[in-house]
Image (cartoon, grey):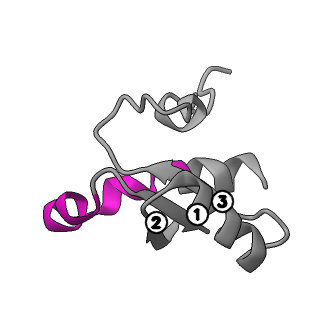
């Protein structure tokens, strides 16, 4: 997965409405091409089903929670911005 796609996937939770966030808080979101595709109750279920559905690995999984993420997705919670310095 390219860095740009990974960053887009990491930012997908920002597009959730407050009601979507409340409804899915604590679940694991499967994100493809910057869009949330599905929610799962457990990380194992999200990883297993996504691995079968997207065998090329072109997906990200993030827990639906307020930042900072504390479940090991540090690269998504604190992904470096593109370097704007010349």
Residue 57 or 40: which is nearer the viewer?
A: 40
Q: Quadrant of the N terminus?
A: bottom right
* Horizontal relation, residue 83 to residue 66: left or right: right
| Residues shaded magenta | 10-24
Alpha carbon distance from label 2 to label 3 = 9 Å
Does label 2 or label 3 sit earlier along the sequence? 2
Residue 17 or 4: which is nearer the viewer?
A: 17
Query: Mark 1 falls on what kind of element?
Result: helix
Task: Residue under label 3, please give it.
Answer: 47
How many marks do you count on the picture? 3
Q: Quadrant of the C terminus?
A: top right
Task: Residue under label 2, please give it.
Answer: 40
* Horizontal relation, residue 57 to residue 61: left or right: right
**Residue at the extreme top:** 85
Q: Are marks 1 and 3 in contact (CB under 8 Å)?
A: yes
* Horizontal relation, residue 5 to residue 28: left or right: right
Q: Are marks 1 and 2 in contact (CB under 8 Å)?
A: yes
Q: Main secondary structure of the magenta part?
A: helix
**Is 78 a magenta residue?**
no
**In x, y percent, where is residue 84?**
59, 27
At label 3, counting other C-alpha atoms closer than 10 Å, the crowd grade (few under 14, some 14-19, many 20 or more) is some
Alpha carbon distance from label 1 to label 2 = 6 Å
Q: Please give the label number shown on residue 45.
A: 1
**In x, y percent, where is residue 35?**
49, 70
Query: Mark 3 falls on what kind of element?
Result: helix
Query: Mark 2 falls on what kind of element?
Result: strand
| Relative vertical location of residue 68 with respect to residue 32 in this rendering, above or below | above
Residue 76 or 71: which is nearer the viewer?
A: 71
At label 1, counting other C-alpha atoms closer than 10 Å, the crowd grade (few under 14, some 14-19, many 20 or more) is few
Residue at 76% from the left image edge and 75% from the top image edge: 52
**In x, y percent, where is residue 45?**
58, 63
Residue at 28% from the left image edge and 39% from the top image edge: 66
């Amino acid at each position: 997965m390219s860095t740009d796609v990974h960053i887009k996937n990491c930012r997908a939770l920002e597009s959730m409405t407050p009601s979507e966030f409340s409804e899915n808080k604590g679940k694991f979101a499967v994100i493809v091409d910057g869009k949330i595709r599905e929610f799962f109750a457990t990380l194992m279920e999200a990883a297993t089903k996504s691995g079968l559905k997207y065998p090329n690995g072109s997906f990200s999984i993030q827990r639906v929670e307020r930042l900072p993420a504390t479940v090991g997705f540090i690269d998504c919670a604190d992904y470096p911005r593109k370097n704007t310095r010349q």
